[in-house]
Amino acid sequence: MTSTILLAVHCKKGESLDLRKAVNTYVAGTYGVQAAEEAGDDMQEIQSLRDDIVNLSGSLQHLRRTLSKYYRMLALMESRFPLSRSREGVNLTFSWADAFKPSKRAEQASLDFERAAILFNLGAVASQQGLACERRSEAGLRESARVFQEAAGYFAALREGPCLRIERPAPMDLTPEAADMLCHMMLAQAQECVFEKAAADRKSPALLARLSKQVSSYYDDCSRLLTSAPLTSHFDKSWVAHAGVKSMLYDVEAIVQSSAALAAADPLAGVAQEIARLKAAQIVLARARKDAKATSKELQENVAAKESQVAQRLAKAERENATVYLQRVPAEADLPPADLEAVDDEVRNLFSSVIPDASAKALSRYTEMVDIVIRKATEALDAASDEARLRLREWDLPEALQALEAGSVAALPDAVRSELEDVERSGGLKHLQEVAQQVKEVRRVAVEELQAVARDLANEEADDEQLRAHHGSRWNRAPSSQLTRGLRDRVAGYQSNLAVAGESDSRLERRLAGESAAFAALGIEAAAAEMPRLQAPMLSVDNMGPAAAVTTLRTALEGLDTLSAQRASLEEGLKERKQRDNVLPKLLAAPRDAEALFREEIKKYDDLVDEVDANVAKQGQLLAAIRPALATYKADYGYEDWKRACNSAAAGIRQQCARFKELQDNLAEGLRFYMSLQEAIAQLRQHVGDHILTRRMQRDEMVEELRRVAESQRLSNQMSTMQLGPQPPPPPPSQQHQGSQGQYPSGPYHQQYPSSNPYTGQQTQQQQGYQQGGGPAGPYPSFGPLSSNPPPSQGGGYSAPTPPSDWQSQGPQQQQQYNTYGGGSGAPSTQQQQDQPPPSYGNPMQGTGGHVQNLGTYLSDVFRK
């Protein structure tokens, strides 16, 4: 994902104030003139620092150091110089403008107000430093993430400290809600830099998914705060849109990365989930594109780029699924939850320098006490949940009670239920019919392609024979029927393969048609309806044991469900209470009695701990009541006999599932066969095209050569009329071109196909299987070496198409003839050239065997005579 735009916070602007004069007046009146003179230098330094802060002078780094130093000095002033508008304290009034609406100003005679404004500016300056970092480099990303984390720490300290102590009504930018929103914004931008660094380092998609989900979560929290009171009408709409669009963008990034991780872990099952999740991502991006109109142009471009990326990934996944995996795409609601647990948060409460060291250590002690209480309660709840789950599984509950209901899936054995679920996930009968239709379509294309190849060879051979009949012995090139024998054998071999495969197709079609009704009934509900039903025993009026046992069991199971829901609620309650538990203000107010404070504060968890203990005890009572009632129920209802009857009845369903899976595998095998055959036919068509092109070039040159010979014959006849006496006829073309054969370029259609044929190994193995008298393992016969009589069918199955055996085993002499046109590496020997001259013709204008030189010699002899 490309880098997106980040935000920085403007500093609050304050009004100048004469601190030195006000404090000196108070010190002189309270401690004496000498004390005022001694404190004069210190107050001058504080005055200089505040003037620099109000004027926002110096670099960002310098301004940040000035703010930090002034903040620490305010902490020292608080215990020595009480501020008050009366004469009893330092008469100072601090004035600061709202950072987001500068026209609004607030005044308070409170050091807490001044400290809150300084803390705000510290976070704002840190955010500006983070924005100024060069994020295109690794060092810049690290620095930017660090500074944004520090900015989040400043705003967190503002939220938990001075914001709570300033006078009300407080300026909107100094409310706890505003500080919390800015803290989440800075955390989101810090995490965004961490994500960009991980993406640049090519980390795994699973890690990138978790990082991007954490970014989305922070921006979502920020958007929620911006759209809630009291901030909803204070911030510009662009802030709200920015946070919302960023949340959706990184939510989509998490979806994309998690989909990639699923597809990489399990391509077969992951591609369907990837398609479903990417379609859901497109819906989110559509909302983001609409909201992005209120944001910057850069963010709108980020949304458009992400839409393009998702569209490309979706198109690729759909193409692969349609051609390779053939998986049913589930609905978004049926998808399992993605593993997008956010990474550990390492940036909360980082700015601890504004809290006294003793208070920070004491606070960590209280946090440890809370963690111990929550951990013990959580472990007790987890142990209770595990015990209930194991006991119910051991006792076959609640399935044993569900067996009383007609059509209950509890009657299905686990193995049968799992097989039926696999059938339903694959698409059932509809999926088989779709694959069978695909097989028909691919076969039709293969037949048409092979017929086109055979037609091209026949047309070329007919053209050659027509010219041979016209020119007679002068047409002395090799006949097409000899040169294309290997190609025609391959065509015949593929046709034989198609014929045998067609028989297998027909058998599968008949089998699918015959078992369609049975396959349509392969569903969990339909199978459960066919299972035996657990019947209630015949009871007398006085014997109510079985009915009472059923009532006891149902009541106990309902109680266990209620306790399980309560446990989940208790865990959430413990986490929420810890999150809201903030003892820092109380700790700062009474730092010397921290242990007493902690003992009192930890009691707020006692009610939840008591509820946990009561929940665990209640579950123990219910489990104790279930055991005897279940024994009575199983004995009176004949539960074990009923289970054996269900296993017997499920045997037929399992056989039907096995037949479904076998037919599914056969159809998939057929589809793969025809796809590989199409590739082989495409290669054959290319070879035939090269052959025909070369033969046409030879034909045109040879026709032109015969025309020239006829022209020289006509010239010879004209000279004979000059009474020079009878002249010997010109040599026939076969003698004139004896030395020019084999000079034409040859095509690639006589290469040795066995060396690149991917089907030779399979053909040999299958042929050996038939020679040993054993049929193939699948429902189709394998294809052995092609011959006029293919092996008889003994089942049904596909194998890859194989070239004819005589193409693979040509003798050296025949291969040498093919190499004349096919560009073979070996040249024929001298004896072979004499015995079998290659049917090729040289250029009539080159070499000693050309027509021009022969005609000149002939005319010279005529005139001499």
Image (cartoon, helix red, strand yellow):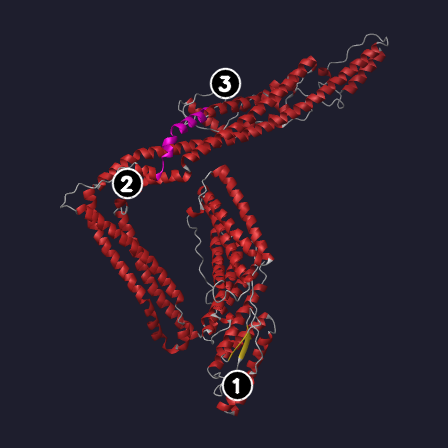
Residue extent of the magenta highlight: 503-524
Of label 1 and label 2, which has the lower sequence position?
A: 1
Give the farthest residue toward the right: 722
Q: Is residue 621 above or below residue 234?
A: above
Task: Name the front one of labels 3 and 2.
Answer: 2
Circle 2 packing at 10 Å, graded few (<14), some (14-19), many (20+), is some
Q: Nearer the viewer, residue 609 or 789?
A: 609
Q: Nearer the viewer, residue 825 or 359?
A: 359
Of label 3 and label 1, which has the lower sequence position?
A: 1
Residue 489 spot, x, y in % from top left: 55, 21
Main SS class of the magenta portion in the image: helix
Q: Secondary structure at mark 3?
A: loop
Q: Secondary structure at mark 2?
A: loop
Asked if residue 790 shows in the view, the reply is yes
Q: Is residue 515 magenta?
A: yes
Residue 243 spot, x, y in % from top left: 52, 60
Residue 676 spot, x, y in % from top left: 51, 31
Q: For this view, does 301 lie left or right of residue 175?
A: right
Q: Amino acid at mark 2?
A: Ala
Q: Nearer the viewer, residue 822 or 446?
A: 446
Circle 1 packing at 10 Å, graded few (<14), some (14-19), many (20+), is many
Instruction: Say which mark, if any, is on residue 23.
Output: 1
Instruction: Say which mark, if any, is on residue 788.
Output: 3
- Separation of marks 1 and 2 at Cα, in angstroms: 89 Å
Q: Nearer the viewer, residue 648 or 518?
A: 518
Q: Amino acid at mark 3?
A: Ser
Instruction: Say which mark, if any, is on residue 406.
Output: 2
